[in-house]
């Protein structure tokens, strides 16, 4: 059986985002104590593909939806509507 082994020392999110060809929606809570919000800012800056950023004030890890449901859903809907386009080429990974 083949297994995928990927550790943090073998993969760089920043490097991947520097060559990304698909739209990326970043959503992060400002009070996340598990994954610092600064990491999302660095990822957003490194991303060369079309991108949007939503930082939810007061949200801890995984709580952005519960803190700001309407804004979260609107961000996803707007992002989907902007990039769900059949004429957009699909990037081969």
Image: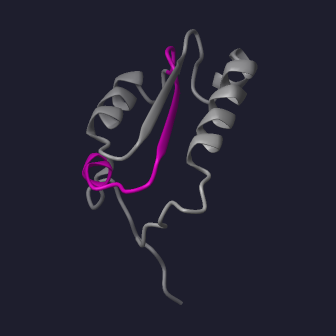
| In the displayed structure image, the side of residue 47 where residue 4 appears, left or right | right
Location of residue 83 in the rendering, given as x and y in whole percent from the top left corner = 56, 47
| In the displayed structure image, the side of residue 47 where residue 72 appears, left or right | right
Residue 54 vertical position relative to residue 92 in the rendered view, above or below? above
Instruction: Say if the magenta span includes residue 24.
Output: yes
Q: Residue at x 51, y 14 (%)?
A: 31
Q: Where on the picture, by quarter, is residue 42? A: top left
Colour setup of the view: one colour
Instruction: Say if the magenta span includes residue 9.
Output: no
Outermost residue toward the front? 87
Q: Of residues 60 and 49, which is closer to you in this image?
A: 49
Q: Where on the picture, by quarter, is residue 80? A: top right
Location of residue 13 in the rendering, given as x and y in whole percent from the top left corner = 33, 49
Q: Of residues 17 and 32, which is closer to you in this image?
A: 17
Location of residue 33 in the rendering, given as x and y in whole percent from the top left corner = 48, 21
Outermost residue toward the bottom? 1
Number of callouts: 0
Q: Of residues 91 and 10, which is closer to you in this image?
A: 91
Outermost residue toward the top? 58
- The boundaries of the magenta stretch are 14-32
Q: Residue at x 35, y 59 (%)?
A: 7
Q: Residue at x 27, y 61 (%)?
A: 10
Location of residue 60 in the rendering, given as x and y in whole percent from the top left corner = 58, 19
Residue 56 vertical position relative to residue 49 in the rendered view, above or below? above
Q: Where on the picture, by quarter, is residue 6? A: bottom left
Quarter of the image with the C terminus in it: bottom left
């Amino acid at each position: 059986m083949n297994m995928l082994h990927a550790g943090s020392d073998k993969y760089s999110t920043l490097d991947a985002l520097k060559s990304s060809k698909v739209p990326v929606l970043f959503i992060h809570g400002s009070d996340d104590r598990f994954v610092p919000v600064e990491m999302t800012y660095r990822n957003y800056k490194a991303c060369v593909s079309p991108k949007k950023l939503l930082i939810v004030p007061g949200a801890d890890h995984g709580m952005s939806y519960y803190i700001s449901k309407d804004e979260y859903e609107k961000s996803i809907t707007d992002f989907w509507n902007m990039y769900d386009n059949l004429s957009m080429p699909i990037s081969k990974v």
